[in-house]
Amino acid sequence: MTLELPVRIRPATVAIVGRPNVGKSALFNRLVGRRLAIVDDTPGVTRDRLYALAEWRNRTFSLVDTAGIDVDLPDSDDIARRTRAQAEIAAREADVIVFVVDAVSGLSPLDDDVVAIMRRTHHPVILVANKAESDRVRSQIPGEFARLGFGEPIAVSALHGEGTGDLLDAIVDSLPPVGEPVPEDDELALAVVGRPNVGKSSLVNALLGEERLIVADAPGTTRDAIDTMFDFHEHHIRLIDTAGVWRKIKHHGSIEYYSSLRSLSAIARCDVAVLVIDSMLGIMDQERRLAGIVLEEGKALIIAANKWDLARELGEYQQAELIGVIHEQMPFAAFAPVTFLSALTKRRLGSLMPLVMRVWANLDRRVSTPQLNSIIRDAVYAHPAPGHGGKPLRIYYGAQVGTHPPRFLFHCNDPDLATRSYRRFLENTLRANFDFEGVPLTLDFKPRTRDEDEAG
């Protein structure tokens, strides 16, 4: 039996915007934690991330929160400026915008700032009145927010979860049509991602062999980024760049939110993501988030430790020590290879593209069913799964049912007996026997049917 796999396409992006204290983060957490199924809650990724890949009514989309504006700032003008900046970013980067207002306190001048920006966008705007816990508040909502011009607000309570089903329906109804699957050819889509000032621009220019500006404001560009083509041996490489965008909005104080949206767009369209880190600083929270997004999206991951020439001059640590720190900080991405280079001096730059090509090939690596079952059978025999209530996990047979990334389906007596630790053991067994360096693996478990039991 084969498993029908979903088409790999870029999920639409849904951004939650609004002034401070309207409950954006509470609504984000409510949608993600209660009403939506996160596709892959990767262990080790910090839980305060601004992004979640979610599903509702068989549509997958990326939900992005715009939290992070400091409401304790003494300068109210700075709060207004940051609110406008995040709204502008959402209007430019998202496919659907969820505009949240406070049903209790009513309209604010900051809401008017957001409204002015939303009216200039061509993306659907869903108006949501949060904190609608009482009948009295709900009755006042239509009149209070009618002048905004976005239709009747959807009344919700992020605190209690009321109205979130209607909101999710509205989101799905507003999503753009499902895109066509990208045809498989000899073109590799390569994304360069990372936080600001780690050397992404220098690395892009070094790969291209020239100084080239990737970001453009010309109408019609895909999310303000131009894909650049170059050849590596006989292969065509589509470089999806996120470098060079930070200067435009650094003074707005919205760097992390902007980088989340832009990186999300780049990662969703790539095959392989190169996460650039600063060798002098190691792993930061934002890099853990980016690595988690790459793996949740089913993309291959390579970690490029840039500025290694400077770290080497200081001589404070060896490559093996930094690799150990990276694996300790991101245990969920321990299978991602780490390469050390200097984009500025081009030292060891030649090691990157051969590694990219090898990892790209691993995305489509297939394991024959007899070979898979032989290895899994030996591993299970040597390390049986711990039983639960006297009932042990029994794996009858397995098969690889997909690639890009590799996906395996195991028929067993009870999928609930496949604990996280034992799934990890089986994944490590596969990695020890086959070259899956740099790519995430999906292991699904399915109970054997009665017909299969009678036949077998």
Image (cartoon, helix red, strand yellow):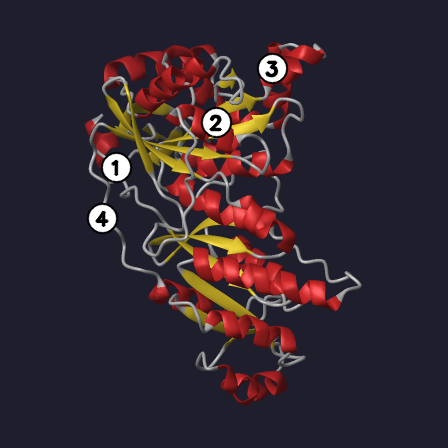
Badge 2 marks a residue whose secondary structure is helix
Q: Residue furthest front?
A: 211
- Amino acid at dot 1: Leu
Seen at 64% across and 20% down, the residue is 325
Marked residue nearer the N-terminal end (1 or 4) = 1
- Amino acid at dot 3: Asp
Question: Residue 434: x percent and y percent?
Answer: 36, 13
Badge 1 marks a residue whose secondary structure is loop
Q: Residue 180, labelled with which disc?
A: 4
Question: Residue 315: x percent and y percent?
Answer: 70, 10
* Residue 392 in view, yes or no: no
Q: How many marks?
A: 4
Distance between the Cα atoms at labels 4 and 3? 44 Å
Query: Badge 2 is on which residue?
Result: 203
Query: Badge 3 is on which residue?
Result: 309
Q: Residues within 10 Å of mark 4 (few under 14, many from 20)?
A: few
* Label 1 with label 3: CB-CB less than 8 Å: no
Marked residue nearer the N-terminal end (2 or 4) = 4
Name the quarter where the C terminus is drawn. Answer: top left
Distance between the Cα atoms at labels 3 and 2? 14 Å
Name the quarter where the N terminus is drawn. Answer: top left
